Amino acid sequence: MDRNDAASDRHSSDGRSSFEKFVEAIYHQVSRAPFFVVCLVVVVAWGASAPLWPNLKEWQVAIHTVASVVSLLLLVLLENAGRRSEEASQEKLNVLAEALAALMDSSAADDPELQQATRRLREAVGLEERH
């Protein structure tokens, strides 16, 4: 298997890797009410289990450890999803600004103010630097 085959195994036809698909699936699950209910049930079960633990310090350590690990994993996954969403939004805005600048260019032949506005738009979003 050459490098291109390995890369295509990691990315699907839509260009997303298995990890990106996993992050998206987790993001959709944890942002819904059932996930909150599951978390609430875990906390209630933990609270009700206090009499079953011989040492209350171990009882507290158990929930703190589980909560810390789950929180860290969710934080990383949700930050990844948020970053990708932000990048996608920024790319859409850049495409819109580029299209607007092109439209303004096509109409700006006789209008110096429109030429100036087009130049300011391109500078503001860095369109000249990207191309």
Image: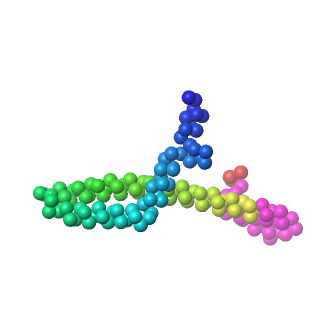
> Which residue is at the far left?
54
x, y percent for residue 19? 49, 47
Which residue is at the front of the view, 36 or 62? 36
> Which residue is at the far top?
1
x, y percent for residue 57? 16, 58
Q: Is residue 82 magenta-colored?
A: no
Residue at (50, 59) in percent of width and height: 82
- Using the rendered view, name the quadrant where residue 98 is placed: bottom right
Q: In screen coordinates, is 72 left or right of 47?
A: right
Q: Is residue 108 magenta-colored?
A: yes
Q: How did the renderer colour the structure?
A: rainbow
Q: In screen coordinates, is 74 left or right of 128?
A: left
- Using the rendered view, name the quadrant where residue 34 is placed: bottom left
Q: Magenta part mainly helix, strand or loop?
A: helix
Position of 20 relative to 41 (above/below): above
Which residue is at the front of the view, 50 or 61? 50
Q: In screen coordinates, is 25 left or right of 110?
A: left
Residue at (30, 64) in percent of width and height: 41
Which region shows up in magenta?
Answer: 102-128
